[in-house]
Image (tube, rainbow, N blue to C red):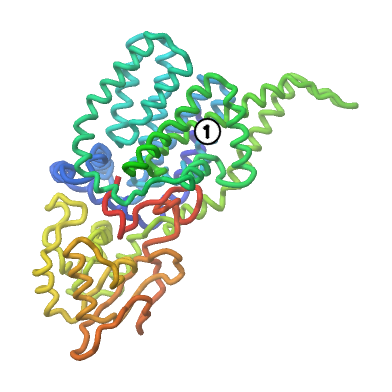
Amino acid sequence: MAVPMAVMFATGLWGLDRGGMWGDESVTFQVAQRTVAQIWRLLHDVDAVHGLYYLFMHAVLTVHPGEVVLRLPSVCAATATAGLVAALGVRLAGPRVGLWAGTLYAITPMTGHYAQEGRSYALVAAGVAGATLLLVRAVDAGGARAWWPYGTVVVLTCVLHELAVPVLGAHALTLALLRVPRKMWSGWGRAAGAVALLLLPLVWVSQGQSGQVAWLVPPDWDRVGKLARNVAPGPAGPVFWGSLLLMAVGLRERRPAAVALPLLLVPPGILMTVSQVRPLYHDRYVLYALAGASLLVAAGAGRVARALGRVRFEGRRTRIVGRRVRAVVGVTGVLALTATFLSQLPVYRQDRSAAHRPDNLAVVSALAVSRMRPGDPVLFVPSVGRLAALAYPKGFRRVRDIALRESAPRSGTLWGRETTPRELRRRLAPVDRVWVVAERSALDPHRGPTDPVERTKLAVLAAEFTVREEHVHEERVRDDVLLRLYVRRPAGEPPRDPTGVRPPGMSAGAPGLASPRPDTNRPRAGHPAHPPTPRLSSGFGRR
C-alpha cells in the first residue's frame, strides 16, 4: 500500500499551487470561511448537499486560508483511496494485484485531476473505497457486528455527497455475485436501511434545491464513451485498449470481478438511466467508480502473470522457469506502469495549468487592480460573476458593486442579493462609466435572461452605454470572462451592437476565466481525461 500512496501523494502535490481558483473552488473557499451559523443559514436555501464538506473545510481553513490548504484534503483523500484500492486488491487477489491496482488508480489522469480540486469528490471516492473494503471484510468475517463500521462509513460518504448512494446498488450486486448466505443479506440490509433512513432529511432538503443542477443534460452514448476513457489509465492509444483487454481477462477472476465490476458499472448506470428523465449525471459524481476499473485491470494483469509463471521458456543457452519467470513478470509490471505514467505526462502538465480549469478568478482580480480607479462602479453579469470578488477581494476593494443590495454572508446566499430593477436603473442614471465583469456570451444583446435584474443590466448597457475598453485573453477558444469598460453614450449617438467588437484601448494581455476543458461540458478543456463543469453563465447551482 505504501507505494501507491506515495505515488498518489507525489502526483497530487505536483503543481498544486496553480495560482488561481476556479468558480466551484471559490465557492468552497468563501463559504468555508463564514461562521458556522452563516454556513447553516446558507444550507437552508442552497448547497445542502455540500453541507458536511463545508463544515469540514471550515475547520481546515481555520489553520490557514489559502489555495494550497484548500486542495490538501483532496490530495490526502486521493492518497488514502490509492491505499484502500491496494488493500482491496491484496484481500481479493494477493499482494501483486493490490500493488498494481493501487498504482493504476494513482496514475489515472482523472484521479490526479480531482485530487487537486477544492471540492468533495476525492473525499467521496475515499469513503466509497473504504466502505467497499469493509463490505469485503464483513463478508469474510460473517458476524453481525462487522456491518456497523460499513454502515457508518457509507452514511458519512453519502452525507458528503448524496449521489454516492448508488454505491449501495453496486454492493448489493457484489453480494449477489458472491452468492452470500441469507444471514449476510440480513446484516447488509439492516445497514443499508439505516443509511436510507439517516439520509432522508438531506434528500428532502436537497430536492427543494434541485435547480442547482438545472444545467445538466441527459447523457448520451458519447458521454458513455468519455467516461470509459476517463476511468482508464490512458484515454486513448495502446494504454486504453490494453486496459480494456486486461479488464476482459479480469472478469475471469471471480472475487475481484464480483467487487470491481459492480463498482465500475452500477453507479454510472443508475445515474445515467435516471438522468434520461431527470438529469443528475456528471462524471465527477461517479469518480469513485474509477476504483473498480483499476481493480479489474490489475486482476486481469494478475491472471496473465500467473499464466506466464507456469510456462517454461527454454532455449539453446537459457532455461527460465518458476521463480525467474515471476521475477521477469514483476519487472515487466513495473515497467508497464512506468510507461503508462510517462505516456500521460502531457495530460498531467496540461491539467496543472490554471488555464485548464473553467475559469481563473485570480486573473479577473488582477485585472481589476490594474484597470479600475477607486470608486468606479462595477457590474457582474450575471451575478454569479461576483465570485471573483468574493474569492479575491483585493482587486475589488476600491470599487463599488453598484447592483449589490446585501452581501453573500449576510444574505445566506452564495454571491449576495442584488437590488431591484427599478433601483438599479436609478443607481446607474448618474454614472458616466461602469466596469462589467462577464462572460462574452452573457453580454449578447440577443440573449434573454429570465431574471429581471439581469435583463435590466443588459438593457441599460445596450441603450445608454458604449464600450470603451475590453480586457481579455484573445487566444481562448471558449467563452472568455472579460473585463469591459462601458462609458455613457453621447446624446444623439445611436446604440450599436457590441458583439464581436474590439474597441480602441482593448487589452488582450491577461488570461480570461473560461477555458477549453473537460468539466464544463467539460471534460475539462477538451481533454478526454476529465468531465465538464458548469460555466459562470450556465451553472448557477453547484453540486
Q: How many marks?
A: 1
Q: Residue 337 in the image: x percent, y percent? A: 61, 37
Q: Observer-nearest residue: 45 or 71? A: 45
For mark 1, does the 10 Å Cα neighbourhood hold few (<14), some (14 to 19), or many (20 or more) residues? many
Q: Residue furthest right?
A: 316
Q: Secondary structure at mark 1?
A: helix
Q: Residue furthest front?
A: 277
Q: Observer-nearest residue: 379 or 276? A: 276
Q: Observer-nearest residue: 509 or 540? A: 540
Q: Residue 336 in the image: x percent, y percent? A: 64, 37
Q: Observer-nearest residue: 31 or 398? A: 31
Q: Residue 326 in the image: x percent, y percent? A: 70, 24
* 60 to 199, vertically: above or below: below
User: Which residue: 42% across, 36% down?
Assistant: 268
* 377 to 179, vertically: above or below: below
Task: Evaluate whether residue 366 shows in this view.
Answer: yes
Q: What is the quadrant of residue 356 in the picture?
A: bottom left
Query: In the image, is 385 to the left or to the right of 42?
Result: right
Query: In the image, is 149 to the left or to the right of 226?
Result: left
Q: Residue 306 in the image: x percent, y percent? A: 67, 22
Q: What is the quadrant of residue 160 in the picture?
A: top left
User: Which residue: 33% across, 46% down?
Assistant: 70
User: Which residue: 37% across, 13% down?
Assistant: 185
Task: Evaluate whether residue 59 shows in this view.
Answer: no
Residue that label 1 marks: 294
Q: Amino acid at mark 1?
A: Ser
- Looking at the rendered image, the quarter that the C terminus falls into is top left
